[in-house]
Image (cartoon, grey):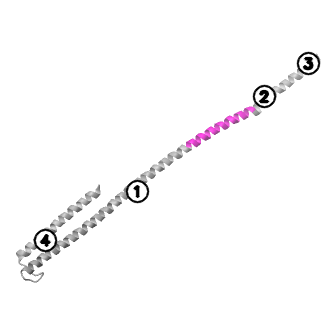
Amino acid sequence: MNKYIKTLIISAVVFMVLIAGSMVYYYVFFRPNNEKAKWQAQLKVEEEEAQAKLKLEEEKLKLEQDKQAQVKAEAYREEQEKQNKQIALNNALVELDNWYNKTLDEAYKGYMERWNDECAYRGLQPNSRLPSDIANDLTQAYEDETKRIDDLYKSQKDDLYKQYSN
C-alpha cells in the first residue's frame, strides 16, 4: 500500500501543480490579456468617439465659416450695388447738368438773336439799346424761358434722386 499511497500522493501533487499552473496561467497571462484587450477596445471606442466629435466640430466650424463668407460676400455685393447706383446717379446728374448748361446757353443765344433781330428791324447796330417796352418784353421772354428750364431741371433732378434711391 505504500506504493499505492505514494502514487496517490504523486498524483495529488501533480494534480495540484496542474491546478496551480492553470490558475497561474489564468491570472498571470489570460486574464490580464483579456482585460488589456477590453481596455484597448474601450480606448479605441473612446478614440473613435473623440474623432467623430472632432469631425463634427470641424464641420460646424466649416459651416460657420461658409456662412460668414456668404454674409461677407452678400455685404460686398450690396456695397458694390450701392456704389454702382451712386456712380450711375453721378453720371446721370453730370449729363443733366450738361443739358441744363447747354439749354441755358441756347436760351441766351436765342435771346441775343431776338435782341439783335429787333435792332436790325429798327435799323440799329447789334446790341444797341431798344425801347424799354420791347426790351422788357424780350427780357421777360428770356426770364420765362430760363424759369421753365430751371423748373424742368429741378424736376428731372428730383426724379433722378427718386429713381436711384430705391
Q: Which residue is mark 3?
A: 5
The image quadrant that residue 110 belongs to is bottom left
Label 2 amino acid? Answer: Met
Q: Nearer the viewer, mark 1 or mark 2?
A: 1
Q: Which residue in the structure is indicated by mark 2? A: 23
Q: Which mark is residue 142?
A: 4
Relative height, residue 74 to residue 121 (above, below):
above
Is 20 included in the stretch rendered in magenta? no
- The CA distance from mark 4 to mark 2 is 126 Å
- Label 3 to label 2, Cα distance in Å? 26 Å
**Is there a contact, CB below 8 Å, between mark 4 and mark 3?**
no
Looking at the image, residue 144 sits to the left or right of residue 97; the answer is: left
Q: First in sequence, mark 4 or 3: give its number.
A: 3
> What's drawn in magenta, residue-wise?
30-53
| Proximity of marks 4 and 2: CB atoms separated by less than 8 Å | no
The residues bearing labels 1 and 3 have C-alpha atoms spaced at a distance of: 102 Å
Residue 53 located left or right of residue 118: right
Q: Residue 46's quadrant in the figure?
A: top right
Q: What residue sits right under mark 1 in the picture?
A: 76
Give the answer, above or below, for where 16 lies relative to 67: above
> Is 146 on the left-hand or right-hand side of 44?
left
Q: Earlier in the sequence, mark 4 or mark 2?
A: 2
Q: Amino acid at mark 3?
A: Ile
Marks 3 and 1: in contact by CB < 8 Å? no
Residue 16, image x, y percentages:
83, 24
